[in-house]
Image: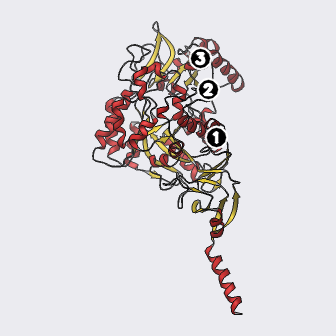
């Protein structure tokens, strides 16, 4: 009898040691991305958070689970974080003419004709054209659009979002003439006649008359974007520039369970939004973090809107332009510095980077760990790199491999040394936050990984990589897509690695991007995506 009681006691003690979990992942190659970059085989999830990490034997010994997933040796990573994208913009682009990949203006026109025949819209919008991909690498003009669509307004946004081609119907609707005053960009003319090209701030003249999407259309766009992002293993996205209305809709959809993506919202930094949110203060839920403002310093390099300290090498006496005035940028920075909010500024040209870095230094003097970001940091003067010592570089590796064909033409052999300098930026700040800027670039984080490490495009060009002195290692790149991106959002204690106490946001891949031939990385597929321990893909 005594022996039986001892056996029962041992059994009961063993039972007491096992914790009930909701989900257990076993037999995996788990990249925890913790401080030591430790590997594990398994982990347990309860109430949406990681509660145990270790070997398969240890997890099975310590946990029982409602659901067990055998990963069959596949690689498991923390859910990827896109540190700079346009999540809502991606969804809305699904409702427009897709002009990405067009090889000529003729192809743009053909896509428009097919789209309008099917949709028959009162106002046609599209996005994705890039004259740098065409044989004739010049901005298109509106004449042929006017012939095809004499009465239907057409507005076609360049791939980078910094130029619009509008037809005469759209120009007339916006009441724009050759005498219209503008600032912060350009309205191109040819012999005193409008060409239809609007660059940077003047694009707002055209945009103001484009019918706004309805709540139903915006909701559909958010869900479309979420589906696409989950398919690529993204579990948090930093949406770089959202209106108050969009943020409030996202919050409503998340709270109702209709939208599961975690979103770090950068508020579009106009006077109205600054007044409202600086008074309201930071707002955070498990899925939505509203604690930063997105500011525009300049335009884009591809459309020659990036602000340079010396003229463009391929356009004499042209310097690009600041999108906002220096006074507005400095006054806004001062106001934000007096709050707990973060300031994230689009700065591409060396002049914009110089101005914003100096502005940050002036207004943040004496403060610590504010984690203000420079978004893009594409062309930086060599003497300005040290200014990133306490400023987060938020960079997009695929910009380097998209722009490498013409970037040196824009800035010349000397300035390009400070261009797309990811390793140099990492060496100064100690971390980099990696993103894509989609839909400017493709959504896939595997292209981000490939561009950062191999510095090649999908054609595996150039053979030996582009400016390889600024390539990142695989570990650095993975950290930039996970824990360092989380750090840039003040969220490193809740996501970005597979550790006890953090959200159970993780992905299972069909191949191990840390081990395979680097040229095979772009073809990686996501087997499963989990957010909060829930399978969403």
Please tell me which of labels 1 and 3 falls first in the chain. Answer: 3
How many residues crowd around disc 3 within 10 Å: few (fewer than 14), some, or many (20 or more)?
some
From where the camera sits, is residue 423 visible?
yes
Give x and y (percent) for residue 25.
66, 58
Query: Above or below — where is 520 with respect to 125?
Result: below
The residue tagged with tag 2: helix, strand or loop? loop
Mark 1 lies on residue: 228
From where the camera sits, is residue 392 visible?
no
Q: Nearer the viewer, residue 159 or 405?
A: 405
Residue shown at 67%/21% (left/top)?
111
Mark 3 lies on residue: 134
Q: CA distance from mark 2 to mark 1?
A: 17 Å
The residue tagged with tag 1: helix, strand or loop? helix
Give x and y (percent) for residue 362.
28, 39
Please tell me which of labels 2 and 1 falls first in the chain. Answer: 2
* Horizontal side, residue 327 vs residue 105: left or right: left
Q: CA distance from mark 1 to mark 3?
A: 28 Å
How many residues crowd around disc 1 within 10 Å: few (fewer than 14), some, or many (20 or more)?
some
Please tell me which of labels 2 and 3 falls first in the chain. Answer: 2
Q: Nearer the viewer, residue 219 or 530?
A: 530
Snapshot quadrant of residue 534 = bottom right
Mark 2 lies on residue: 100
The residue tagged with tag 3: helix, strand or loop? loop
Residue shown at 59%/33% (left/top)?
442
């Amino acid at each position: 009898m005594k022996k039986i009681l001892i056996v029962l006691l041992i059994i009961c003690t063993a039972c007491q040691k096992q914790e009930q979990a909701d989900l257990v992942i076993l037999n995996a190659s788990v990249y925890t991305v913790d401080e030591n970059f430790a590997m594990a085989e398994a982990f347990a999830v309860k109430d949406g958070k990681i509660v145990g990490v270790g070997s398969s034997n240890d997890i099975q010994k310590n946990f029982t689970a409602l659901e067990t997933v055998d990963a069959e040796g596949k690689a498991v990573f923390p859910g990827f974080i896109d540190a700079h994208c346009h999540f809502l913009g991606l969804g809305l682009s699904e409702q427009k003419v897709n002009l990405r990949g067009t090889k000529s203006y003729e192809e743009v026109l053909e896509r428009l004709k097919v789209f309008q025949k099917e949709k028959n819209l009162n106002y046609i919008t599209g996005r994705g054209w890039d004259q740098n991909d065409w044989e004739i690498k010049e901005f298109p003009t509106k004449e042929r659009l006017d012939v095809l669509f004499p009465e239907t307004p057409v507005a076609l946004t360049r791939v980078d979002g910094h130029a619009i081609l509008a037809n005469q119907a759209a120009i007339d609707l916006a009441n724009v003439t050759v005498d219209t005053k503008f600032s912060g960009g350009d309205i191109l003319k040819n012999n005193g006649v409008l060409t239809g090209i609007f660059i940077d701030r003047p694009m707002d003249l055209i945009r103001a008359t484009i019918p706004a999407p309805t709540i139903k259309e915006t909701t559909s766009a958010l869900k479309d974007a979420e589906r696409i992002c989950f398919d690529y293993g993204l579990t948090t996205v930093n949406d770089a520039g959202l209106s108050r209305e969009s943020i409030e809709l996202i919050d409503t959809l998340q709270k109702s369970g209709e939208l599961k993506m975690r979103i770090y919202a950068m508020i579009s930094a106009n006077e109205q939004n600054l007044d409202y949110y600086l008074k309201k203060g930071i707002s955070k839920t498990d899925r939505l973090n509203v604690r930063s403002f997105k500011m525009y310093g300049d335009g884009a390099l591809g459309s020659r809107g990036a602000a340079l300290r010396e003229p463009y090498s391929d356009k004499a006496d042209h310097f690009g332009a600041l999108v906002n005035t220096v006074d507005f940028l400095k006054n806004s920075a001062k106001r934000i510095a007096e709050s707990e909010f973060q300031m994230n500024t689009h700065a591409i040209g060396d002049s914009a980077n110089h101005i914003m870095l100096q502005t940050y230094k002036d207004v943040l003097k004496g403060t610590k760990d504010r984690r203000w970001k420079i978004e893009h940091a594409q062309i930086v003067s060599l003497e300005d790199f040290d200014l990133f010592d306490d400023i987060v570089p938020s960079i997009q590796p695929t910009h380097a491999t998209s722009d490498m064909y013409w970037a040196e033409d824009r800035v010349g052999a000397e300035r390009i040394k400070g261009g797309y300098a990811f390793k140099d930026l990492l060496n100064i700040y100690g971390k980099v936050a990696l993103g894509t800027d989609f839909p400017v670039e493709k959504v896939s984080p595997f292209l981000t990984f490939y561009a950062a490490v191999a510095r090649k495009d999908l054609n595996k060009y150039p053979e030996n990589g582009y400016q390889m002195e600024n390539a990142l290692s695989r570990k650095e790149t993975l950290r930039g897509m996970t824990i360092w991106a989380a750090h840039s959002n003040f969220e490193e204690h809740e996501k970005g690695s597979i550790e006890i106490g953090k959200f159970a946001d993780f992905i299972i891949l069909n191949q191990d991007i840390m081990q395979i031939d680097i040229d095979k990385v772009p073809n990686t597929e996501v087997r499963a995506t989990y957010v909060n321990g829930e399978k969403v893909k």
